[in-house]
Amino acid sequence: LDAVEAHEHSGARQPFYLGKVPLRKELPELADQIEQAASCPRRMFGECFGSLIPDGVFTYFGCGRNTTPVHWDAHENLLLCITGTKRLFLYPPSDARYLYPCNDFSRSAVLPFASYEDLPAELQERFALVRHACPFEVSLGPGDILYLPSSWWHCVEGSDNRNMILNWWFALHPDKKALAAAADPG
């Protein structure tokens, strides 16, 4: 943090990003304080989900408009903005056919936060279906919390200044799993 603060005080732009840092492993005292807080999102909303994934709460910390690719996560997600801002594009699972899944099919080949109209002609031709995607734009500030359902495509952009979120990833609630299994025609 000393290097980050030195850059902030000097006015120099020094983008950085620490992603998916497990608090229990790296900062156990902070993890304990969060879990004991009366307003802990896990305490307030945890019964809506299945079990917390084994590493518990994670943090993402950065500056310089750090941006993720368009992707989806297999777990239910509660995201709490601690400082700075985060901007997200959220795409329902039904938009997958427009997002050009690649690699292990949890990532998209399309550019994050780019509308079809803003793409160069060669990319418009390559990603012609993306014009049919219907993202929701969400902006989070300190204290804001977002529920991001499993399998929703999204990209995340942090603010220019220091930004930090806490993330709780949960398994599906047993009732939700049962409904999904009952709806599966296979």
Image: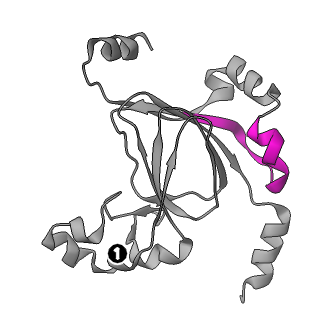
- Of residues 131 and 180, the one nearer the viewer is 131
Question: Would you say residue 53 sits in the magenta stretch?
Answer: yes
Q: Is residue 6 left or right of residue 32?
A: left
Picture quadrant of residue 148: bottom right
Number of marks: 1
Residue farthest bottom in this picture: 185
The residue depicted at 47 percent of the width and 38 percent of the height is 85
Q: Tell me where the magenta segment starts and ends, as one range.
A: 40-59
Q: Secondary structure at mark 1?
A: helix
Q: Is residue 175 left or right of residue 102?
A: right
Q: Is residue 17 visible?
A: no
The three-letter code of the residue at mark 1 reads Val
The residue depicted at 73 percent of the width and 27 percent of the height is 34
Near mark 1 (Cα within 10 A), the count class, few <14, some 14-19 or many ≥20, is some
> Residue 177: percent from the left, percent from the top?
78, 69
> Residue 1: percent from the left, percent from the top?
45, 15
Q: Judge whether 11 appears above or below 122 on screen.
A: above
Question: Would you say residue 179 sits in the magenta stretch?
Answer: no
> Residue 23: percent from the left, percent from the top?
64, 28
The residue depicted at 72 percent of the width and 89 percent of the height is 185
Q: Judge whether 168 appears above or below 33 on screen.
A: below
